[in-house]
Structures are given as structure tokens and as C-alpha cells.
Image (cartoon, grey):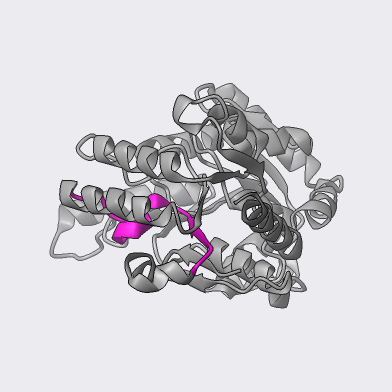
Amino acid sequence: MNVLFAFDGDLNPYVDVVRAGLAAAGRPTDVGTDKFWSDALFRHDVVHVQWPETLFGWRAPTADEMARLRRRLREIQPRAQIVLTRHNAVSHLATAKNAAIFRELYELVESACDAMIHMGETSRAQCIDQPHLRGKRHVTIPLPVFDELYAPYLDVSRAEACRRLGLPANRKIVLAFGNFRNDGEKNLVESTWRALGDPRACLVAARWHSPRTYGFSPRHPVCLLRSLRQMARARWRHMRLEPKRNFTDEEVALYFAAADVVFIQRLDDLNSGNLPMAFLFRKAVAGPGVGNIGEWLRKTNNPVFDPRKPDSCRLALQQALEMSATGKGEENHAYAMAHWTTKQVGAAHARLYEALAAAR
């Protein structure tokens, strides 16, 4: 059986981890959007699409490109099974200007697929009765815990990680990791942190702002004063707000190793890789009670919050900080290693492919 992941390399390690799990299950895969558009595609029995926008280089397609994709999917359907992983309900790249074309893109690929992978039952329940998705095979395969990818760094102690990152080891470290995509996510974190008001804790918000957000040139005194004031206010509140940049695997591991609690700052996302990462590094988690994120947090008894209710956010973070001192992180780790390992996720994908082949 030949399987193609219609995907190019990205900072998100998810696809590489799943492919590693498939290789361990005896199902090596090809990868690349170039193969999706070439005649070599027809040597594959399964074409697996992740984020549909990756077929166009992480951008909104034109009307002509959408027509080309329709033709391509019609060419594939008699020859191979199409699988789609539902990472999100709508594209993270969608804006008021391009939301319609992204919605059309998602619905096109969803309608063409033979099977849809969901990372939780919440996602599956949202889709199973939609008219264009009835009759599809819907399976739930959770996010992997990235155990093999970060294995070289799992022995780094919290104290060592704090030392290398310049963080105060004598404070409780709350980590909000990943790009802050909009002001709503920043407001969520800032308001929750103000409401918590715990002088014993330190917030680390990685990828908070653009590297050009703050200006410290004396040639621009207004910008300089504003930047100094913002940085001083953050320091006074024990907030470390870092610029957006690319991290190595080792740097990512250091942030999670240093944390006591991981705070998932999303408002209405379906999934978050921060959840399995927190579990891998034995951390308590507070996150929004939405999508698959809320489902898994409730299932594992980690605190959830309503992003629209500030007191709910404060209470969830406070509970997570208390849990971090009572072994919750170890419980989370044990759960993840029992259900979400790279090998388990890869084997689940392999079983789906085999079922699709048998059904043809």
C-alpha cells in the first residue's frame, strides 16, 4: 500500500511524528504537495490531506486554483482513497476578506474525502450528521504526545531549564506557548494574569509579539518611551513577553521543562498541541472548555475555563497551580503514555488505511 501525505515541511512537527509512527507500524509514506499535483500521484492508494490550505502553500487559493483542485480530486477518487485530518473547523489564515474562499476550500476537500480523522469525539460529533459528510468513515485518533521527537530532552530538570532560559526557579512558572494569533488571546492572558495576582508566580508568553513591536532607538523617543513603559509594566507584573521566532526542538523542550503549569490561551480552537506537550513534560494544564481541548481536559480532570468569563479563567489557572504541587503532572504523563504515543497513533492510522483498502 502506497500512502502520500499531501503536505510540505512546516514548523508544526505533527506530520513528521505521524509518519514516524506509520513507519514503525510497517507503513512508510511519501510526502509532498508536488506529488499531489504530479502524475506520480496515481501510484498511491491513499492520499492523506492535512490542512487543505497547504495544497496552495499556506495561502488562499484563487478561483482558477479552486477549479484545478476540483478537477484533481475527481481524478483521484476512482484511483485512491482520500483521507482528511480535521485539525481545525476553519482555517487559521481566514480573514474577513478571504473567509469565503477558505470555507469553500474546506468544504470541497471534506466532500471529496472517503474518511475523516478527528482528534476527539467532539470534532466527530460536529461532523457526522452534516449533509456533505454523511456516509464518510469518521474515526477518532488523538494528537500524539511527541514522545519520540522530544525523547532526548526529557531528562532536563526544571532547575536546569530555568537556568538556561534565565527564568526564576523560585517562582511558579506559567507557560503560554505558541503564536498569539490575535488581541483576544493576549487579552485573555493579560486579564487572567491580573486577576490571579500571585506574586509567587511568573508568566512566560513565548511568541507574544512581533520582533518589531518594541522600539528602543533614541532617534524615536516617543516609541522608545512607550516601549520602555510596556516592558516595565510587564516586568512589574512578573510577565516575560517574548518576540515571535522559530524555536529548535531543544528550545521548545526547555520551555515545557521549566513550566509548572501550561495555560492554553486559545479562544475557540478545536485542538492544541500544547496539551500533549504539557502531558509529556508532566505538567498540569488549564485550558478553554472548547472543542477537543475541553474534551480531553475534562476527561483527564484538568481545569477548564470559559474564555468569555474572566473569573472562570482565573479560577482554572489557580486550580492548575495548586494541582501542580500534588502530582497532577505525573498523572497526565501516565495517561498520555498509555493512550497517545507515537507508535499508537501511527498504528491507528495504519489500521484506517487497511480498512479503507479492504472496503474498496
Q: Nearer the viewer, residue 66 or 191?
A: 66
Q: Which residues are magenta?
A: 44-62
**Residue 126 picture location, percent across and down:** 55, 28
Q: Residue 328: say if magenta.
A: no
**Residue 54 picture location, percent across and down:** 37, 58
Relative side of 211 to 259, left or right: left
Q: From what the image shows, is residue 214 above or below residue 150? A: above
Determine which quarter of the picture holds residue 289.
top right
**Residue 157 picture location, percent across and down:** 75, 70
For the image, the number of numbered tags is 0
Looking at the rendered image, the quarter that the N terminus falls into is bottom right
Q: From what the image shows, is residue 327 above or below residue 311? A: below
Q: Nearer the viewer, residue 30 or 103?
A: 30
Q: Nearer the viewer, residue 131 or 158?
A: 131
Relative side of 308 to 201, left or right: left
Q: Residue furthest left?
A: 219
Determine if residue 166 is in view.
no
Q: From what the image shows, is residue 305 above or below residue 320? A: above
Determine if residue 235 is in view.
yes
What residue is drawn where x is 75% and y is 60%?
Answer: 341
Determine which quarter of the picture holds residue 146.
bottom right
Q: Residue furthest bottom?
A: 152
What residue is drawn where x is 36% and y is 41%?
Answer: 108
What residue is drawn where x is 40% and y is 66%?
Answer: 245
